[in-house]
Amino acid sequence: MLSTPIASPAVIFEGLKLLGHTDIRWLVIIPTLLNLILFSAATWLAAAWVSDWLNWLIASVPDWLEWLAWIIWLMFVLLALVIYSFTFTVFANLIGSPFYGIIAERVIALERGLTDKTPTSTKALLATAWGSFRRELQIIAYMLPRTLGIALLTVMISFVPIINILAPLIAASWAAWSLALQYMDYPGDSDELSFTQVRQRAGKQRLLSLSFGLSALVAAAIPLVNLLLLPATVVGGTLLWCREYSEI
């Protein structure tokens, strides 16, 4: 059992080790290849966007605030990294959701010792895959308006000296909560809970949820390694769900 929120990153590394399991590894290959294409495009666009905006931002700093230029630079880079990690994860999970739903189902069976009850027929696997994809669209519908609101708030704050330091903290907190919900929803859906019920359970252990979500955000920010850490986070989130949330 995980007793402290700081222990939550450990389940991602545990998930990484489980990716080679015979019941899971074939489900990782296709979304990883698709995410490689997405990663290449997203990284190229993010690099160009950050470079242009950073040059404009530094040039717009008034002379009397030049001593704050390095803080503004660091704040902007952190904010850009949060946006990049969050956006990449959302789209990568949308692409991989048909596979990740099946992975969560397999991990739950392994964790609870129910491997003989894991659906293996093509019809059952396709039903799980389609259900996971539809559920992912539901999560995006929940996150999109709220993310736009948070983005507007952080942009407004970014232009206010001193206070703009809070911008990456606000963005990271929301991203961590959103990713926690996203990764908890795969096993929650497998346990036949609605997305609302998953949110309620995550809210009852908010600190643990935010800790795991932040770990997922950091994992998504590591270039190339994130291609394997994404499915590992799905496995880790499922393990965390089984051990800390399923009996709430």
Image: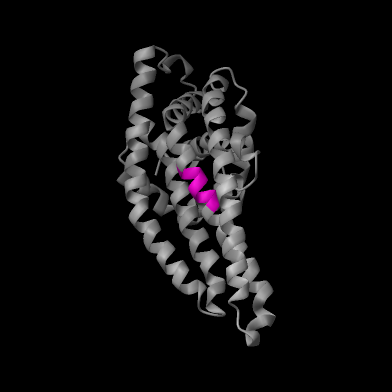
Q: Quadrant of the N terminus?
A: top right
Number of numbered discs present? 0
Q: Residue at x 37, y 38 (%)?
A: 136
| Farthest bottom residue in view | 64
Residue 84 vertical placement versus 171 (above, below): above
Q: Quick check: 209 left or right of 69?
A: left
Spot occupied by residue 244 in the image (x, y as percentages of width and height): 48, 43
Q: Quick check: 219 left or right of 154?
A: right
Numbered range of the magenta stretch: 84-90
Which of the colour schemes (rainbow, by chain, secondary structure, one colour) is used? one colour
Q: Any magenta on residue 87?
A: yes
Spot occupied by residue 161 in the image (x, y as percentages of width and height): 55, 80
Q: Residue at x 36, y 45 (%)?
A: 140
Q: Residue at x 59, y 61 (%)?
A: 52
Q: Quadrant of the C terminus?
A: top left
Spot occupied by residue 40 in the image (x, y as percentages of width and height): 59, 39
Please tell me whether the stretch drawn in magenta is mainly helix, strand or loop: helix
Q: Nearer the viewer, residue 45 or 195?
A: 45
Q: Residue at x 65, y 85 (%)?
A: 63
Q: Quick check: 147 left or right of 15?
A: left
Q: Nearer the viewer, residue 114 or 233?
A: 233
| Farthest top residue in view | 121
Q: Any magenta on residue 164?
A: no
Residue 47 visible in the picture: yes
